[in-house]
Amino acid sequence: CQPTCAEPNRTVACSMFICARGCECNKGYVRMTEQDEDNPCIKIDQCPGQIINK
């Protein structure tokens, strides 16, 4: 599914979900978590407590 702070390089397609316009993060942004349906898209460098290799 979509990249998250925990998995910023995720590329697995989620065929079981139908996405409406606006439900995906813009380039350079990831979901903060995947625990909450309404979690926000944030810039990768703003992920809390994560060290991310870009």
Image (cartoon, rainbow, N blue to C red):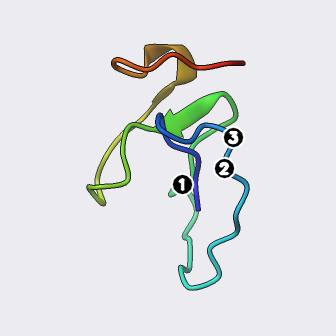
CA distance for labels 1 and 3 = 20 Å
Residue at 73% over, 55% down: 11
Where residue 42 sits in the image (x, y, percent)? 45, 28
User: What is the C-alpha distance between the residues marked 2 and 3?
Assistant: 4 Å
Rendered view: 29 above or below 49: below
Q: Position of residue 19 (x, y in %)?
A: 56, 71
**52 above or below 30?**
above
The residue nearer to you, when weighing 51 against 19, is 51
Compare marks 2 and 1 and give the one earlier in the sequence: 2
Place residue 14 in its image quadrant. Answer: bottom right
Amino acid at the residue labelled 2: Arg
The quarter of the rendered structure image containing the N terminus is bottom right
The answer to whether the residue labelled 1 contacts the one labelled 3, judged by CB atoms less than 8 Å apart, is no
Disc 2 target residue: 10
Q: Are marks 2 and 1 in contact (CB under 8 Å)?
A: no
Please report the residue visible at 58 percent of the width from the left and 54 percent of the height from the top: 2
Residue shown at the point (66%, 27%) measured from the top left: 28
Q: Which residue is mark 1?
A: 22
SS label for mark 2? loop
Q: Which residue is mark 3?
A: 9
Q: Residue 48: x and y, percent?
A: 34, 20
In the figure, residue 7 lies in which quadrant? top right
